Image (cartoon, helix red, strand yellow):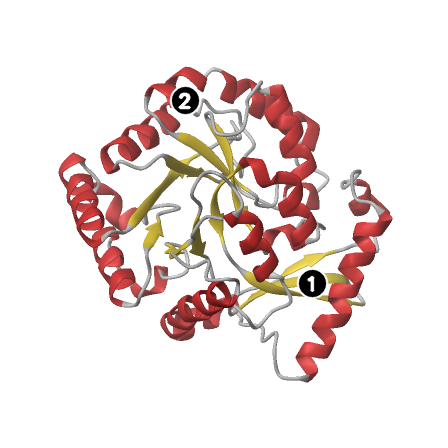
């Protein structure tokens, strides 16, 4: 069974205002094994040239840290106007940067909450367009020695991603993979352990995020919590990830905010045709656990606007908590 490295994703520390190299240094100083750079903030993008990337690579390798890169896309549309766009050059640039950094993973995230608004393109349309856009990138990604790691975000479920990979004629470990976000599974009406099991062979990177799920008059509400403070079975998920033949890094992504799932609306539930009564029952059980944990002072919700005030302390605590989870899981920590 493989060892798991514990790092952070670059989204949570945004309020710290650290450029990429400084974020690597911050992560190293607080006991993290690496950083997944999901995206680069606009004010730092002009710095990202070959020389800067080489400096990042040399620092990470000197400290024994991993780097995973971002900036890629998979849905070939502008996510606000829905105008069709060519994403080949965007992904080629991300692949070229990843090659300089000597990392195999480039994470892709094209937006979210698509099916929440019936005016948005249908999921089947987005799946078809995504497969057509990605198939022509197969050779380019292979030539750069990278895997496009599609985040389990709010556009496709694990069932739909399996169909996408079949449409792309891809196999695990080749040129397409998954960035497993453990909390986003809840928001896509999937039990995190079941969803991880469904997509496990395709996992190439992670966003490790604890969270909670509550049933209200308006529907289900999900939100991130500090690692170990929520209801997601991160222990079981870690054991599953460690069973993979290829190494997996656990990049903690933490932030504030909440998401409403209007499950009382038949139109909304119809957007999840693969959801079974059994799995929905598991979600309801998790909602009951959330209520009990809230009564015990756990599952604390952080407002998005309050995140800057707590992000540094919470990320430091997240790193320690995740290491503790791995240590208790037969010493899975790297």
- Nearer the observer, 243 or 20: 243
The residue furthest bottom is 296
Query: Which label belongs to residue 103?
Result: none
Q: Please indicate, yes or no, whether residue 157 appears anywhere in the rendered image.
A: no
- Nearer the observer, 324 or 156: 324
Circle 2 — which element? helix
User: Is the residue marked by circle 2 packed among few (<14), some (14-19), or many (20+) residues within 10 Å?
Assistant: some
Circle 1 — which element? strand
Residue 236 position in % (x across, y down): 61, 57
Of the numbered discs 2 and 1, the one sitting upstream in the chain is 2
Question: Rounded to the nearest whole Å, what is the CA distance between mark 2 and mark 1?
Answer: 36 Å
- Nearer the observer, 109 or 173: 173
Q: Please indicate, yes or no, whether residue 213 appears anywhere in the rendered image.
A: yes
Image check: 193 left or right of 138?
right
Residue ID at (83%, 57%)? 281
User: Is the residue marked by circle 1 packed among few (<14), some (14-19), or many (20+) residues within 10 Å?
Assistant: some
Residue 39 position in % (x across, y down): 37, 45
* Residue 112 occupies quadrant: top right
Q: Which residue is mark 1?
A: 221
Residue 178 position in % (x across, y down): 52, 38
Seen in the picture, residue 294 relative to 187 is either above or below; the reply is: below
Query: Which label belongs to residue 88?
Result: 2
């Amino acid at each position: 069974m493989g060892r798991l490295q514990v790092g952070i994703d670059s989204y949570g520390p945004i309020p710290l205002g650290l450029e990429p190299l400084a974020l690597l240094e911050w992560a190293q100083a607080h006991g993290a094994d690496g950083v997944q750079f999901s995206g680069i903030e606009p004010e730092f993008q002009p710095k990202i040239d070959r020389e800067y990337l080489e400096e990042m690579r040399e620092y990470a390798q000197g400290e024994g840290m991993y780097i995973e890169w971002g900036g890629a896309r998979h849905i070939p549309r502008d996510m606000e106007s829905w105008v069709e766009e060519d994403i080949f050059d965007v992904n080629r640039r991300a692949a070229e940067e990843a090659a300089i950094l000597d990392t195999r993973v480039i994470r892709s995230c094209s937006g979210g909450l698509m099916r929440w608004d019936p005016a948005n393109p249908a999921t089947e349309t987005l799946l078809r367009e995504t497969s057509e856009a990605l198939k022509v990138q197969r050779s380019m990604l292979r030539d750069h020695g990278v895997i496009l790691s599609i985040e389990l975000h709010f556009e496709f479920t694990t069932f739909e991603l399996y169909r996408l990979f079949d449409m792309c004629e891809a196999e695990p470990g080749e040129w397409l993979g998954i960035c497993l976000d453990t909390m986003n599974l809840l928001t896509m009406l999937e039990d995190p352990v079941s969803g991880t099991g469904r997509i496990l062979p395709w996992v190439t990177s992670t966003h490790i995020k604890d969270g909670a799920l509550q049933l209200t008059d308006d529907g289900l509400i999900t939100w991130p919590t500090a690692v170990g403070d929520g209801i997601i079975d991160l222990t079981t998920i870690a054991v599953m990830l460690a069973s993979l033949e290829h190494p997996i890094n656990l990049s903690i992504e933490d932030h504030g905010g909440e998401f409403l799932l209007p499950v009382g609306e038949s139109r909304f539930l119809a957007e999840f045709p693969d959801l079974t009564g059994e799995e929905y029952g598991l979600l309801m059980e998790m909602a009951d656990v959330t209520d009990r944990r809230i009564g015990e002072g756990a599952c604390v919700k952080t407002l998005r606007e309050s995140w800057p005030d707590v992000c540094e302390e919470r990320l430091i605590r997240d790193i320690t908590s995740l290491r503790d989870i791995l240590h208790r899981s037969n010493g899975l920590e790297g």
